[in-house]
Amino acid sequence: MSKITSKGQVTIPEAIRESFGLLPGCEVEFVVEQGKILIRRELQRGKLDHWVGALNLDAEVDAFIESLRAVKSGKKRKKRA
């Protein structure tokens, strides 16, 4: 059991923190379901997940990569029809 402090804080018991890998700085979400309060750990995201969908290509991926390689090597890419 834990008590809520005057600031609305609750201590998660050590055994539960260890069991779920809750480390300082982890984010949790509070959800109400069927009259119960659930605490869910935020799913860990990869370091690049926030970039997914950020690059809008006007070409196929292979053509885009080829153009990057051409720029790196100093060659101009021929346009394909």
Image: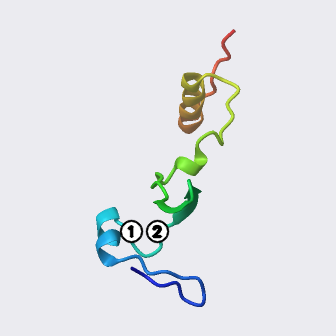
What residue is drawn where x is 53% and y is 35%? 73
Tell me if residue 44 comes above or below residue 19 in the rendering: above
The residue furthest front is: 35
- Circle 2/circle 1 CB separation < 8 Å: yes
Where is the C terminus found, in terms of image quarters? top right
The label on residue 26 is 2
Residue 16 image position (x, y, % from top left): 33, 69
**Which is nearer the eye, 56 or 15?**
15
Q: Amino acid at mark 1?
A: Leu
Q: Residues within 10 Å of mark 1 (few under 14, many from 20)?
A: some
Query: On screen, 62 above or below 52?
Result: above
The image shows residue 80, relative to residue 73, as above or below, that is above
Tell me where residue 59 sits by quadrant: top right
Where the N terminus falls, by quadrant? Answer: bottom left
Q: Secondary structure at mark 2?
A: loop
Residue at 54 percent of width and 82 percent of height: 9
**Residue 11 horizontal/vertical position (percent):** 44, 81
C-alpha distance separating marks 2 and 1: 6 Å
- Secondary-structure class at tag 1: loop
How would you rate the neighbour count of disc 2 (Cα within 10 Å): few for under 14, some for 14-19, many for 20 or more? few
**Location of mark 1 (residue):** 22
